[in-house]
Image (spheres, grey):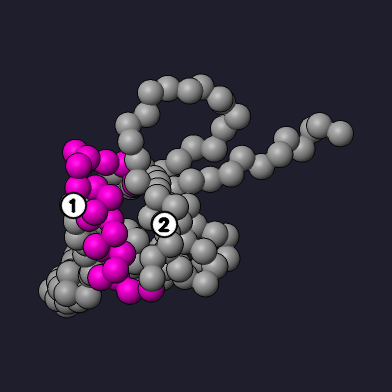
Amino acid sequence: MNFTGNTPDDHIDINVTSLIDVVLLLLIFFMVSTTFLNPSHINLTLPKASNSSTEREKPRTIEVSVDKEGRYAVNGQMLVNSQPATLKRALGEAARDLKEPPIVVQADAQATHQSVIRVLDVASQLGLVHISFATETPPDQSEP
């Protein structure tokens, strides 16, 4: 019995047409279902909490305080209500004589996120883009 003899060479072909169809359908699905991120419209300068006490000549800033009830104060003056129009008017008046003034947002730890975002939104509408957040340096844990 000679098994290696007169057998024709069998070529095994892989049909990749259906594989290409599936890959193209997946590609189209992912292209259609992908969401693109919109860049932020507010440029923020995030504060760095440190123990350095260097005093430099600082430009005149606008301080916006937000308490835990969502009330606002601009440069220490409480606003009559928490409406965006009132906040916009107060920020516009505070920034009237200043060229690109930096804004320091001092928000209470219990203040709602919406209250802080309202400050950022109103500042963006007025073209005020130099915004930072005031932080408090935690006490050094190593001291007795």
Badges 1 and 2: C-beta atoms under 8 Å apart? Answer: no
Nearer to us in this view, 141 or 85: 85
User: Which residue is depicted at the point 22% across and 55% down?
Assistant: 92
> Is residue 28 at all visible to an observer of this figure?
yes
Residue positioned most to the right = 144
Q: Nearer the viewer, mark 1 or mark 2?
A: 2
Which residue is labeled 1 in the image? 127
Residue 129 in the image: x percent, y percent? 25, 47
User: Which residue is depicted at the point 19% across and 47% down?
Assistant: 96
Residue 66 in the image: x percent, y percent? 47, 61
Q: What range is drawn magenta here?
A: 81-103
In this rendering, the answer to whether 26 lies above or below 41 is: below
Quadrant in the picture for residue 7: bottom left
Is residue 137 magenta-colored?
Answer: no
Q: Judge the density around disc 2: few (<14), some (14-19), many (≥20) Cα neighbours within 10 Å.
A: few
Indicate the amino acid at tag 1: Gly
Nearer to us in this view, 105 or 80: 80
> Is residue 19 at all visible to an observer of this figure?
no
- Image quadrant where one finds the N terminus: bottom left
Is residue 83 magenta-colored?
Answer: yes
User: Which residue is depicted at the point 20% across and 42% down?
Assistant: 97
- Image quadrant where one finds the C terminus: top right
Nearer to us in this view, 136 or 11: 136
Which residue is labeled 2 in the image? 77
Question: Does dot 1 land on a helix, a strand or a loop?
Answer: loop
> Of marks 1 and 2, which one's residue comes earlier in the chain?
2
Residue 143 in the image: x percent, y percent? 81, 32
Question: Does dot 2 land on a helix, a strand or a loop?
Answer: strand
Quadrant in the picture for residue 115: bottom left
Q: Judge the density around disc 1: few (<14), some (14-19), many (≥20) Cα neighbours within 10 Å.
A: few
